[in-house]
Image (tube, helix red, strand yellow):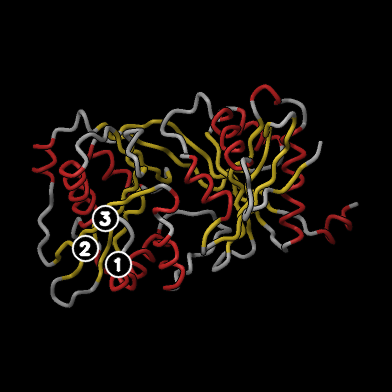
């Protein structure tokens, strides 16, 4: 078996074939698929926050297995993130996945990384593979869905908190340059969200945020963002953002971050931001069907907001962790 690296500058059809293998491996998992455009952006080259590389096994002109590995740059330079590791269903149970994982671990060790993170559904072949290879659960997660076709908008109107002391600003697509510093400020609130014990807080320099914003549409995504600002001094207080594919073909809306900075909490701004964005989305995109969101199961506050809005459990996932031995310690163990 030969594992070959995809040239990010000249991938040919390999990235699209890798995406096809990913879709085949995810058959039976509910919810929206990762679009080919977003897959190419994330797996093929990474972004400003992480360098990425992709490796595949090609047989008979077809990608039958592969993995993507990202190496954070601005923070968490001790770890790597595996997304995805897939083997076509008809080629499973032939040790191909194990060989790919061993190859990925070698790549991490060569870069001095000490921790690997990955995500899979909490049950199924991915979870069994993770347990077999020594991974443990770092964060338990759940996906929930809000069916926009069944929403009681009058009830939402009654739920809408008053925005006393705060005003809301909104925009679509990438953030304008003059708002980037405020966006970076409120994004820092996500560092309060539950995370693996080995994961450091995000470092969000302005150049990182700017580059991420520029790449939003490159990945086949569009977005709707609402930001809360304190009226008295203009201080940014929190934000929410949803993503949708540029062609709107699948009918799904992906809930991105929702956060309120610690000093502005207690005013129900989280609920205000999310409901305001949904009303705006209904006005501009009435054909969209469902919103999907991820939360750590320990994030009681956000879970309470989502459940009050009518989000229903779709499935549960695990973020897995695998500490790595360095080459020297591995040799000592031998």
**Front residue (pair 214, 328):** 214
Give me the C-alpha separation between circle 1 and circle 3: 10 Å
Vertical relation: 192 (above or below) 321: below
Question: Does 202 sit left or right of 5 as displayed?
Answer: left
Residue 5: numbered disc: none
Vertical relation: 194 (above or below) 1: below
Residue with the mark numbered 1:
176
Residue with the mark numbered 2:
228
**Front residue (pair 305, 19):** 19
> Residue 255 at what x, y percent from top left?
34, 46
Q: Residue at x 91, y 51 (%)?
A: 334
Helix, strand or loop at disc 3?
Answer: strand
Question: Does 190 sit left or right of 96 as displayed?
Answer: left
Disc 3 crowd, CA 10 A, few/some/many (<14, 14-19, 20+): some
Residue 162, image quadrant: bottom left
User: Given this view, does label 2 or label 3 mark the residue nearer the observer?
Assistant: 3
């Amino acid at each position: 078996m030969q594992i070959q690296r995809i040239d990010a500058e000249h991938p040919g059809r390999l990235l699209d074939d890798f995406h096809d293998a990913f879709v085949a491996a995810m058959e039976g998992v509910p919810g929206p698929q990762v679009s080919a455009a977003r897959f190419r952006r994330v797996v093929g080259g990474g972004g400003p926050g992480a360098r990425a590389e992709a490796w595949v096994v090609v047989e008979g002109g077809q990608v039958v297995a592969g993995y993507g590995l990202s190496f954070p740059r601005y923070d968490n330079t001790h770890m790597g993130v595996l997304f995805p590791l897939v083997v076509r269903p008809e080629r499973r149970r032939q040790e191909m996945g194990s060989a790919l994982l061993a190859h990925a671990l070698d790549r991490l060790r060569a870069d001095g990384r000490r921790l690997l993170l990955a995500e899979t559904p909490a049950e199924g072949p991915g979870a069994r593979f993770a347990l077999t290879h020594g991974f443990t659960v770092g964060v338990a997660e759940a996906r929930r869905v809000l069916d926009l076709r069944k929403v009681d908008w009058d009830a939402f109107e009654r739920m809408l908190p008053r925005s006393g002391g705060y005003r809301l600003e909104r925009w679509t697509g990438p953030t304008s340059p003059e708002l980037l510093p405020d966006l970076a400020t409120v994004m820092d609130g996500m560092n309060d969200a539950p995370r693996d014990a080995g994961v450091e807080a995000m470092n969000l320099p302005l150049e990182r945020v700017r580059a991420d914003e520029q790449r939003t549409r490159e990945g086949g995504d569009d977005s709707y963002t609402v930001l809360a600002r304190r009226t008295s001094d203009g201080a940014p207080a929190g934000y929410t953002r949803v993503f949708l594919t540029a062609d709107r073909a699948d009918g799904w809306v992906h809930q991105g971050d929702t956060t309120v900075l610690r000093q502005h909490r207690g005013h129900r701004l989280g609920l205000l931001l999310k409901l305001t964005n949904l009303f705006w989305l209904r006005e501009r995109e009435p054909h969209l069907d469902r919103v999907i969101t991820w939360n750590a199961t320990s994030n009681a506050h956000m879970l309470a907001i989502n459940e009050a809005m009518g989000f229903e459990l779709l499935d549960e996932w695990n973020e897995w962790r695998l500490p790595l031995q360095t080459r020297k310690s591995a040799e000592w163990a031998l």
